Amino acid sequence: MLIKIDRQEAFDNFPNLPLRHFNSRAEEDVFNYPKVFANYVLTLFSKSYKGHISLLGREIANLTTKLEFDKLIFLGDEKTAWLYRDHDFKPAKEALQYLIDHKIGKRFNGAIQVDTTELPIFIKHLCWLVSCNAVLPTVHFIDPGQTIIGNICQFGNLHISTMTATGDLNFKEVISKSKFSYLTDGNCYYKFSKSGAIKGRVITV
């Protein structure tokens, strides 16, 4: 189940959600990211991107359940609407339609609350939106207790931060029993094509 949350309400309830805005005077992005305890990049062994994001959705749902969260809250770090950009690549188009089918309107730029049962399918569609550049902001997620913050990069890796020492211990214990592995060098790349090019990705200025 997807539940829409007004953008300001999301910030009021989850102040640790990262933000970004463009400083026109300095001509650069300004990032507001909360103080965290530790940062990790997690990956999965997969033979294809399609299989990878299906597994990623299941593993994030399992992680959420094992950490005793019943939902995650997703929000773009900029004010741009979820459906701001259209896309012709079939998986991206299907992902946009998925949001429309769940009553996400053209102007909606707030948070989307996703319960654990819906996470696998939501993550799959989100991955296509991110990899194809069909959603403009970086979409971060947070749990209701604000113990972890994460996002999925264009290469399909999970970037995640823990907020406290206790939360970090719990997180690492759950990860040790999952299919995730740590990307120790922190260098993400697209491993599903020889050239490294991401299928369906469009760069639009």
Image (tube, rainbow, N blue to C red):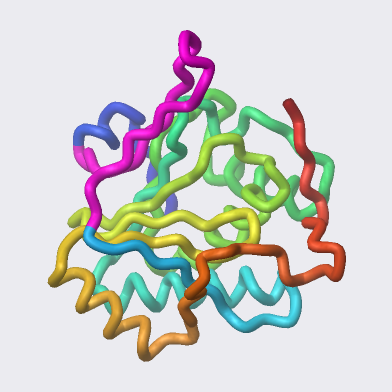
Q: Residue at x 45, y 61 (%)?
A: 159
Magenta stretch: residue 29 in it?
A: yes
Q: Is residue 142 left or right of residue 182?
A: left
Q: Nearer the viewer, residue 137 or 102?
A: 137
Q: Residue at x 42, y 68 (%)?
A: 117
Q: Residue at x 42, y 31 (%)?
A: 20
Above or below, comparing residue 147 to residue 105 in the picture: below
Q: Residue at x 46, y 77 (%)?
A: 182
Q: Is residue 115 left or right of residue 34?
A: right
Magenta stretch: residue 20 in it?
A: yes
Quadrant of residue 174 within the rendered picture: bottom left
Q: Is residue 167 left or right of residue 82?
A: left
Quarter in which the N terminus is drawn: bottom left
Q: Position of residue 160 (x, y in %)?
A: 39, 61
Quarter in which the C terminus is drawn: top right
User: Which range of residues does the magenta coloring cover?
Assistant: 13-36
For this orientation, the residue located farthest to the left is: 166
Q: Position of residue 145 (x, y in %)?
A: 18, 56
Quadrant of residue 170 within the rendered picture: bottom left
